[in-house]
């Protein structure tokens, strides 16, 4: 599964706590139907970060997601969390992020049995501070 995401992030307490609202879509190969599928997702999350100087950051991020299957518009919910490590020469401006995640689709109308999903990823982020004091 591959995710492409755009998100907003609001930081509090000098970057120790944040709220992030990503909107994403995922492409995955459905081996049962033998075709490529797409899901859309919105998943608000809290992020708790531990900064080590300005170069390294560890974080944990629990979330709940609303997923919409692209082929039939069925909605299902999932919960989980990310565990991450960020490296940068200036974390306030940019970072390379290594992350691991766990995700559990909540059984319901469109998910008969929850199955733990896990994985990892790498990303680059660039901070645009729209409210920066002059």
Image: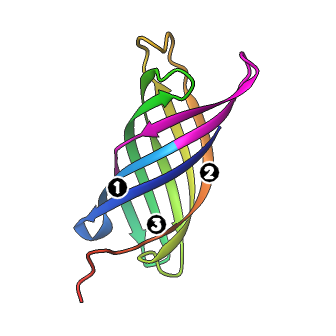
Q: Mark 1: few, some, or many residues within 10 Å (few <14, many ≥20)?
A: some
Left or right of 119 in this view: 13: left
Depth check: give the residue in front, 97 or 49. 97
Front: mark 2 or 1: 2
Please state, as top left, top right, bottom left or bottom right, where the N terminus lies in the image: top right
Residue corresponding to mark 3: 57
The numbered dot on residue 121 is 2
The residues tagged by marks 1 and 3 sit, at their Cα atoms, a distance apart of 10 Å
Residue 74 is situated, as x and y percent measured from the top left of the image, at 46, 20
Residue 130 is situated, as x and y percent measured from the top left of the image, at 31, 74
In the rendered view, would you say 58 is above or below 80?
Answer: below
Q: Could you tell me which secondary element the residue under label 3 belongs to? A: strand
In the rendered view, would you say 92 is above or below 72?
Answer: below
Q: Could you tell me which secondary element the residue under label 1 belongs to? A: strand
Depth check: give the residue in front, 59 or 121. 121
Left or right of 11 in this view: 65: right
In the rendered view, would you say 112 is above or below 3?
Answer: above
The residues tagged by marks 2 and 3 sit, at their Cα atoms, a distance apart of 16 Å
- Looking at the rendered structure, the number of numbered marks drawn on it comes to 3
The residue shown at (46%, 66%) is 57
Residue 102 in magenta stretch:
no
The residue shown at (26%, 75%) is 131
The residue shown at (55%, 26%) is 116
The numbered dot on residue 48 is 1
Which of the 4 quarters of the picture holds residue 48?
A: bottom left
Most common SS among magenta residues: strand
- How are the colours assigned in the image? rainbow
Per the rendered image, the range of residues in magenta is: 25-46
Which of the 4 quarters of the picture holds residue 107?
A: top left
Please state, as top left, top right, bottom left or bottom right, where the C terminus lies in the image: bottom left
Q: Do the residues labelled 2 and 1 touch (CB within 8 Å)?
A: no
């Amino acid at each position: 599964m591959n995710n492409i995401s755009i998100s907003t992030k609001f930081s509090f307490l000098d970057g120790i706590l944040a709220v992030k609202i990503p909107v994403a879509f995922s492409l995955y190969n459905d081996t049962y139907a033998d075709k490529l599928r797409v899901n859309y997702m919105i998943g608000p999350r809290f992020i708790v970060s531990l900064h080590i100087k300005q170069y390294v950051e560890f974080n944990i991020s629990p979330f709940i997601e609303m997923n919409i299957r692209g082929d039939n518009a069925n909605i299902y919910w999932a919960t989980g969390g990310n565990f991450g490590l960020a490296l940068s020469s200036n974390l306030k401006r940019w970072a390379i992020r290594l992350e691991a995640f766990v995700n559990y689709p909540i059984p319901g109308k469109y998910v008969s049995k929850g199955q733990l999903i896990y994985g990892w990823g790498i990303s680059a982020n660039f901070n645009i501070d729209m409210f920066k004091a002059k």
